[in-house]
Amino acid sequence: MVAAEYHPPWFSIAPMMELTNNHYRTIARLISKHAWLYTEMLAAETIVYQKDNLDRFLAFPSDQHPIVLQIGGNHLENLATAAKLARSYGYDEINFNCGCPSPKVAGEACFSVSLMLDPEFVAKAMSVIAANSDVPVSVKCRIGVDNHDSYNELCNFIYKVSSMSPTRHFIIHSRKALLNGISPAENRRIPPLRYEYFYALLRDFPDLRLTINGGITTIEAVNAALKAGAHGVMMGRAAYNNPWQTLGHVDAAVYGVPGKGMTRRQILEAYQQYADSVMGTWGCNKPSLRDLAKPMLGLFHSEPRCGLWKRHVDAAFSDCKTMKSLLEKTLPVMPDYVLDKAPMPLTPSSKDSFTSIHDLLPAPYAAPAPKPEMAL
């Protein structure tokens, strides 16, 4: 598949560990035809060491296009091999993770967001990934790490990676990462958002594609960010926790094309067929019914009887063995009007974080002058 066949990535769903798996992506694609989907991050070592079991990690239904594979790692040979092994699966882009602040990867393993401190290595990594792939490559990063959080340091990272590798797309989480022991959840909340850094990058790197990420939780905010000049917007947990009210508006409100028009009853009927077809395919009863039910729990976010339905689902695991039986047992608690209605209309918001953003930009970045060649 070729990414040019699809609408541009004006809206994408962030890669989230243990969340954006095949199960969630199946639901997301049932709601939105045009949102760009990302896998959860896969370590290059996992792909290399599981090369005889790759379908479990890399296979996906063809209707999930456009879809991006995100990989992480700090070993060039493994990154090259992982990219080569992924080629036959037909992803539309490969993204390199330089933004996850989890101590498991940024601390002990010394990759992900820690790599922002070594842009020369990231450039080498992107070069070997691109050389072993046949699709575009991109980087997802933060705006800084710990005390390395000036706009100039961020620009140096972007400049070196883009000038020393084929990377032309950067996804910028507009918070820095703190590697002082706080949790990944706290890293999504405690460091302040600096959207002005992102919009300054648009000014200073006009030849690059830049996608904004972090703190954007509504479609109204997505369109505000795009209107302010962002090439694309990536949404994270809001798209996971409330997929109906977020993804349900993407096609019409962001892409200007008709939505899929499926009700939640129809989405669950289609998802039930998928879930029952894949249950237990990995051995040791994986994926389990509980695994498959997890990504559908946000479909009724804030609706009447949502909490009651979740409690019924939790109780049903004790005796239901299929998704069909679980839904037959639990859905009767939900009102028909909730199951069959369309997403609520978008309501204009008075809050726009991007209205005056161009008045806050830091001073322009001056790229370092090329070093003169040594005289012979």
Image: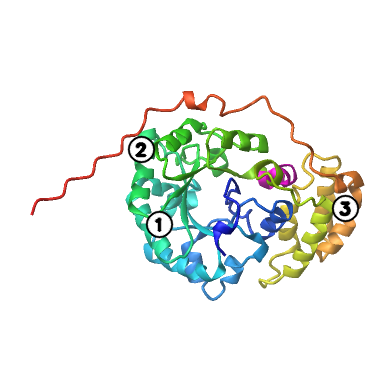
Residue beneath label 3, please?
331
Of circles 2 and 1, which is in front?
A: 1
Judge whether 312 appears above or below 284 on screen.
Answer: above
Residue 57 in sight here: yes
> Mark 1 Cα within 10 Å, few/some/many (few <14, many 20+)?
many
Residue beneath label 1, please?
126
Mark 3 vs 1, N-terminal side: 1
Mark 2 vs 3, N-terminal side: 2
Judge whether 330 appears above or below 208 on screen.
Answer: below
Residue 3, labelled with which disc?
none
- Give the magenta range: 239-250
Q: Is residue 325 left or right of residue 116?
A: right
Judge whether 164 appears above or below 277 on screen.
Answer: above
Q: Quadrant of the N terminus?
A: bottom right
Q: CA distance from mark 2 to mark 1?
A: 19 Å
Q: Say which amino acid is labelled 3.
A: Leu
The answer to which image quadrant residue 117 occupies is top left
The percent coordinates of residue 239 (x first, y second) are 67, 45
Q: Secondary structure at mark 3?
A: helix
The percent coordinates of residue 83 (x first, y second) are 46, 65
Q: Residue furthest bottom?
A: 52
The percent coordinates of residue 145 (x first, y second) are 42, 40
